[in-house]
Amino acid sequence: MYWLTGQVTGQVTGQVNEEVDRLVLVLDGAMKRADIQQALGLKHRDNFRDGYLMPALVAGLVAMTVPDKPRSSRQQYRLTDAGLARRADLLRRRNS
């Protein structure tokens, strides 16, 4: 996946940022990009892709439902097992 390299991987240093945590908390099942953006209250696709989605994909917290066709109109995103664990940890800390 050529678009998972370069600038984004340079920004992801093994630490999950606040934006990725927000994404992990709103992602419910498989969701389309526009629905995730709406849940986050974001209007600009580039900001969402570069600041939220790509770091989450690179960190292995989110996966594409159609990984062989990243630009598919049917593309959706879901939490991986690591993403589900991260969400459980975030919710546990929030409720402590």
Image (spheres, helix red, strand yellow):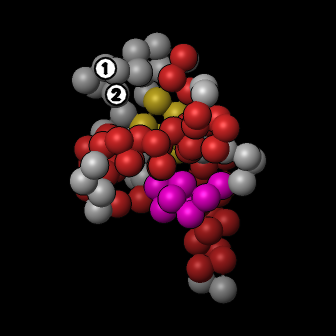
- Choose between 74 and 9: the one closer to the eye: 9
Q: Residue furthest top?
A: 68
Rounded to the nearest whole Å, what is the CA distance between mark 1 and mark 2?
A: 5 Å
Magenta-span inclusion, residue 66: no
Image position of 47 with respect to 6: above or below: below
Disc 2: CA contacts within 10 A as few (<14), some (14-19) or many (>=20): some
- Which image quarter is the C terminus in? bottom right
Circle 1 SS class: loop
Disc 1: CA contacts within 10 A as few (<14), some (14-19) or many (>=20): few
Identify which residue is drawn at 38% across, 47% down.
48
* Residue placed under numbered mark 1 in the picture: 72
Q: Amino acid at mark 2?
A: Gln
* Rendered image: mark on residue 15: none
- Residue 40 vs residue 1: left or right? left
Identify which residue is drawn at 36% across, 34% down.
76
- Residue 80 seen in the current view: no
Please identify the quarter of the rendering in which residue 42 is found.
bottom left
Identify which residue is drawn at 30% across, 43% down.
45
* Residue placed under numbered mark 2 in the picture: 75
Q: Amino acid at mark 1?
A: Ser
Image position, residue 78 (x, y; %)? 46, 40
Image position, residue 10 (x, y; %)? 67, 38
> What are the residue bounds of the magenta stretch?
16-24
Report the number of discs.
2
Circle 2 SS class: loop
Identify which residue is drawn at 64% across, 74% down.
92
Per the picture, the main secondary structure of the magenta-coloured stretch is helix
Image position of 73 with respect to 58: above or below: above
Discs 1, 2 touching: Cβ within 8 Å: yes
- Residue 26 vs residue 43: left or right? right
Image position, residue 82 (x, y; %)? 67, 46
